Image (spheres, helix red, strand yellow):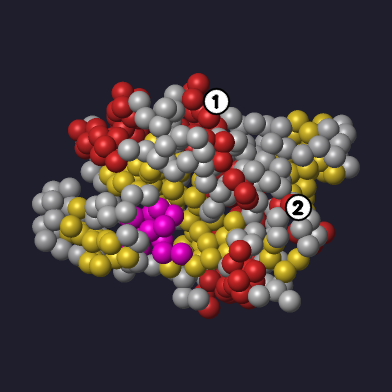
Amino acid sequence: MTTRRDILRSGVSALGMLAGASCAAGAPRTMREARHWAGLGENAKCGLCPHECMLAPNATGICRVRQNRDGTLVTHGYANPCAVHVDPIEKKPLYHVTPGARAYSIAVAGCNMRCKNCQNHTISQVSPRDTSNTFLPPDRVVETALKHKCGSIAYTYSEPTVWYEYMYDTAVLARKAGLKNLMITCGYINPGPLTELAEYMDAANIDLKSFDNAIYGKLNAGRLQPVLDTITLSKKLGMWVEVTNLIVPEWTDDLAMIRKMCGWLKDSLGPDVPLHFSRFHPMHKLAHLYPTPSKTLEEARGIADEEGLHHVYVGNVAGTDSNTYCPHCGKPVVSRRGYLVTGYDIVNGSCRFCKTRIAGVWAA
């Protein structure tokens, strides 16, 4: 008999197990034809992300989710989340989207990057066929999110773009039900699929892992430019965008590079884009390193301020100032203690004190 403790240890919340029946990994009802691919004889070319994997029969893509089955590209990442939780929206982190609201958060195993520092490597670096999953089709995701009084659904924890079909179908139903859709992503997706998805996606936190292409290759097994393209296109398509930069000692802690990144963000997205500097903790293949020094994080925040960004945050550090301040009068308009919102002084999208417009997606 599965106990609540067993469920929590498995990485699937009790809430998730209550939302849908458990299923064996790789069950046929969670496999279906993928979107964004082309058949080339017996091979299948995936067009979802910049890797554009060319898959021979039975081969699986870098993401470990999409596979060539008899000349058809299928996804193993449909309706089978390995993690389901209710989170504060601030945990994503999204600080400028309905502060204090609850986000119904789901994840399917898989990722199209190979980050040496991944904090969720036990689900991101494996296939959905290798995890303990819950059968939770899109309509049940929406139904359960509403039941638990969540204002949004967050596609998070692993890399949601690699289970694109599940995210897309859920987002369509969520929009009809009045829920917001939030994508927490590494941003490694091609423009076509992103454009299609953006019609139903309200906000994204995009992980800009560094501002150096060589580091992207060595640390993350990806390329920088496609991520920059995703950031700018997401904003152009009307999604609210926040950016996270994890500062990894000896890898992404070069302050000159951080300054260059901050300048690019201001020039490309404007000064109001929220930037979250996140503290690294020894993890996965970089367990031999040390946590990011607080001094480095504060220096990075100072550089972002100097470059003209209005909303800069430091995460993964207990007791840090996580308030949102009005860029005109300097008063806190959203006060936080950790993920808890303790004060809210935004009225009709503007600072209560000086009436300056505060960029974000605010509650009515």
Secondary structure state at the residue bearing disc 1: helix
Q: Position of residue 210 (x, y in %)?
A: 43, 31
Crowd around label 1: few <14 · some 14–19 · many ≥20 (10 Å) = some
Crowd around label 2: few <14 · some 14–19 · many ≥20 (10 Å) = some
Left or right of 187 in this view: 36: right
Secondary structure state at the residue bearing disc 2: helix
Front residue of 313 and 172: 313
Q: Is residue 36 magenta?
A: no
Front residue of 101 and 289: 289
Which image quadrant for residue 212? top left
Quadrant of the frame with the N terminus: bottom right
Main SS of the magenta segment? loop
State if disc 1 and disc 2 touch (CB < 8 Å): no
Quadrant of the frame with the C terminus: bottom left
Identify residue type, mark 1: Lys
Q: Is residue 98 magenta?
A: yes
Answer above or below: position of 138 versus 34: below
Q: Position of residue 234 (x, y in %)?
A: 46, 43
Report the disc number at residue 356. none
Looking at the image, which residue is at 60% across and 71% down?
Answer: 5
Identify residue type, mark 2: Arg
Looking at the image, which residue is at 46% across and 64% down?
Answer: 87
Pointer 2 or 1: first along the chain: 2
Q: Is residue 124 visible?
A: yes
Instruction: Look at mark 1 in the image and give the residue it sits on.
Output: 218
Instruction: Look at mark 2 in the image and give the residue it sits on.
Output: 129
Q: Position of residue 95 (x, y in %)?
A: 34, 55
- In the image, the segment drawn in magenta is 87-99
